[in-house]
C-alpha cells in the first residue's frame, strides 16, 4: 500500500500538465516561490491579476514583477513567515493589471522538506472587496437607521412607516401617544414599535386604510376621524408601491394646534418639516427614485391637509 501511494505521488510530480490543470481550476490566485524568492509556478488567476503569463513570470523574483510598495510588503511578510515557523494571514490592497483596486486576504505557507529545511513559499490570495463593500453598506444602513429614527422624533406630527405585512418598520413617539396608553407603554419597551402589527395599534378604519393602500398601490388616502376624544387627520401615502406605506397623523383638537394656529403657522411648519422628512426618507428608502416619490407624497399630503383647513 505504501509502495502504491509513493508510486502515485511520484507520477503526479512528474506530470506538470496535470499539476497546472489542477491549480488553474482554482478560482483564486496562487503562486509558489522558492527559498530565494523566485517564482516557480502560479495559476491562471494569478496571471490575470498581474497581467503577466506564467511563462514570463517563472524564474523571476518578486522584485521584478511587483511595484515597489508591494515589494516591501512581500519582503516584510516573507521574513515574518520565516521567523514565525507557522502560516501567516494578512490583508493587503492590490491593483490588478486592469487598474482596479482589490482588497485581498493573503495566506502564506512555508514549504519545508522532510529534513525541515525551508524550500519555498506558497501564497493564496482571496479577493474580499465585494464582501468589504457589503459590510460597509450594512454598517452605513445601520447608522442611517439610527439617524432616521432620531429624526422622526423631531417631527411634531405622528409618523409611522409600515411594510406589506402591516408590520411597523419605524415610528415616532408622537404616533404612540396619539394611539393611546397601551401603544405608549409598548413604545417604551420597543422604541419605534418595530415589528408590531399596526392593526393592533390603530383604529380599525385606519388599519383598513393601510391594507387598502398597500393593495391598490394608490398614492394617498386621507380622512379625519375621532379617536379617544381627539380629532385626528390621517394622511397615508405610498412609499414603495404595494410594499411600504407611511402615515402622517396630526391631532387637530390639541390646544397647541387650534385652528388659528394651524392657519397662521401652516406654511412655516411645513417648511420646517419638509427637509426633515426628506432626510428621513432618504435614509430609510431603498433607492433615490422611490425616495423622491415618497417625499413628494408626504409633502403633498401635508400641504393638502393644510389647504383643506383653509377651505
Image (spheres, helix red, strand yellow):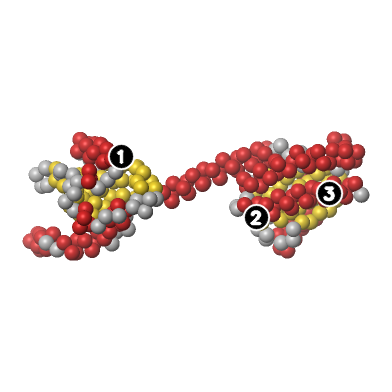
Q: Which mark is residue 251?
A: none
Tell whether label 2 touches label 3 (CB within 8 Å): no
Q: Which mark is residue 290?
A: 2
Residue picked out by circle 1: 69
- As drawn, 12 above or below 60: below
Q: CA distance from mark 1 to mark 3?
A: 63 Å
Other residues around mark 1 within 10 Å, as few (<14) / some (14–19) / many (≥20): few
Instruction: Answer with mark 3 or mark 2, whichever residue precedes in sequence.
Output: 2
Residue positioned 86% across, 49% down in the render: 307
Other residues around mark 2 within 10 Å, as few (<14) / some (14–19) / many (≥20): some
Q: Nearer the viewer, residue 180 or 297?
A: 297
Residue picked out by circle 3: 305
* Residue 52 percent location from the top left of the image: 27, 55
* Residue 298 percent location from the top left of the image: 74, 50
Q: Secondary structure at mark 1?
A: helix
> Dividing the picture into quarters, in which one does residue 155 lie?
top right
Other residues around mark 3 within 10 Å, as few (<14) / some (14–19) / many (≥20): some
Closer to viewer: mark 1 or mark 3 = 1
- Looking at the image, residue 204 sits to the left or right of residue 292; the answer is right
Amino acid at each position: 500500500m505504501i509502495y502504491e501511494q509513493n508510486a502515485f505521488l511520484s507520477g503526479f510530480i512528474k506530470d506538470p500538465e496535470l499539476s497546472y490543470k489542477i491549480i488553474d481550476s482554482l478560482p483564486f490566485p496562487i503562486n509558489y516561490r522558492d527559498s530565494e524568492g523566485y517564482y516557480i509556478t502560479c495559476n491562471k488567476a494569478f496571471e490575470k491579476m498581474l497581467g503577466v503569463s506564467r511563462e514570463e513570470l517563472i524564474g523571476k523574483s518578486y522584485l521584478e514583477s511587483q511595484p515597489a510598495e508591494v515589494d516591501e510588503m512581500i519582503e516584510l511578510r516573507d521574513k515574518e513567515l520565516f521567523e514565525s515557523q507557522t502560516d501567516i494571514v494578512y490583508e493587503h490592497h492590490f491593483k490588478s493589471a486592469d487598474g482596479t483596486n482589490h482588497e485581498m486576504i493573503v495566506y502564506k505557507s512555508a514549504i519545508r522538506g522532510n529534513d525541515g529545511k525551508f524550500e519555498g513559499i506558497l501564497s493564496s490570495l482571496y479577493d474580499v472587496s465585494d464582501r468589504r463593500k457589503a459590510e460597509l453598506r450594512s454598517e452605513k444602513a445601520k447608522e442611517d437607521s439610527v439617524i432616521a429614527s432620531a429624526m422622526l422624533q423631531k417631527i411634531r406630527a405622528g409618523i409611522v412607516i409600515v411594510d406589506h405585512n402591516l408590520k411597523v418598520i419605524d415610528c415616532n413617539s408622537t404616533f404612540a401617544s396619539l394611539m393611546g396608553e397601551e401603544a405608549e407603554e409598548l413604545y417604551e419597551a420597543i422604541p419605534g414599535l418595530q415589528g408590531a402589527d399596526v392593526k393592533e395599534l390603530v383604529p380599525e378604519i385606519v388599519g383598513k386604510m393601510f391594507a387598502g393602500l398597500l393593495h391598490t398601490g394608490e398614492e394617498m388616502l386621507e380622512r379625519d376621524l375621532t379617536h379617544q376624544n381627539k380629532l385626528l387627520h390621517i394622511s397615508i401615502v405610498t412609499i414603495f408601491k404595494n410594499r411600504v406605506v407611511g402615515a402622517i397623523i396630526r391631532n387637530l383638537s390639541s390646544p397647541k394646534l387650534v385652528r388659528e394656529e394651524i392657519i397662521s403657522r401652516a406654511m412655516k411648519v411645513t417648511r420646517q418639516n419638509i427637509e426633515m422628512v426628506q432626510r428621513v426618507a432618504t435614509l430609510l428608502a431603498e433607492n433615490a427614485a422611490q425616495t423622491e416619490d415618497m417625499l413628494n407624497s408626504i409633502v403633498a399630503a401635508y400641504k393638502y391637509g393644510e389647504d383643506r383647513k383653509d377651505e
